[in-house]
Amino acid sequence: MTAALDTLSAALFAPVQGEAFTLHGADGPVVATILARCDEHPRTTMPGSDRTAFSLVFSCPAEAVGAFAGGHCLVSHPALGTVGPLYLERILPTGLPPGHAAFQAVFN
């Protein structure tokens, strides 16, 4: 499945939280991650929006990041298929085990 970005919602990703995803960086890096969090943000949703704002946090061991620094990438999952390109930003791995890296995508 390849979904249009404007049709994505937290409901699509919540059932696969904790499962493996692969990030395919624009410059070639491939990073194996898990979907660590899928959070809805109703207070930041624009009035009249077709979906509730949400964010996704992907994590992996920090040493697995290699040359990937975030940016535009494709995100793939065995059941969901490929989504993107999405813009992922490296964030502090708050709430994750020591030695992990975290990347976040935000959908308004």
Image (cartoon, rainbow, N blue to C red):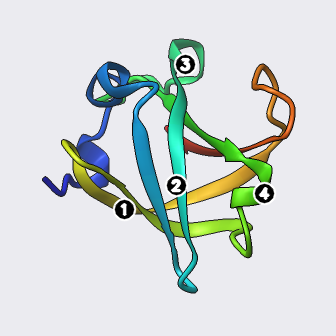
Residue at label 1?
84
Amino acid at dot 2: Ala
Q: Crowding near pointer 3: few (<14 within 10 Å), some, many (20+)? A: some
Q: CA distance from mark 2 to mark 1?
A: 16 Å
Q: CA distance from mark 1 to mark 3?
A: 21 Å
Q: CA distance from mark 3 to mark 4?
A: 31 Å
Residue at label 3?
41
Residue 51 sits in quarter: top left
Residue at figure coordinates x 55%, y 18% from the top left: 41
Q: Is residue 71 above or below residue 17?
A: below
Residue at label 2?
32
Q: Crowding near pointer 4: few (<14 within 10 Å), some, many (20+)? A: few
Front: mark 3 or 2: 2
- Residue 81 at x, y = what percent? 21, 53
Amino acid at dot 3: His
Amino acid at dot 1: Gly
Verify CB contact (< 8 Å) between mark 3 and mark 2.
no
- Residue 92 at x, y = what percent? 84, 38
Amino acid at dot 4: Glu
Residue 67 sits in quarter: bottom right
Residue at label 4?
63
Front: mark 2 or 1: 2
Label 2: which secondary element: strand
Q: Nearer the viewer, residue 9 or 36?
A: 36
Q: CA distance from mark 3 to mark 2?
A: 26 Å
Q: Of the two numbered discs 4 and 1 on the same chain, state the one appearing first in sequence.
A: 4
- In the rendered structure, the answer to whether residue 98 lies left or right of residue 27 reads right
Label 1: which secondary element: strand
Front: mark 1 or 3: 1
Q: CA distance from mark 4 to mark 1?
A: 25 Å
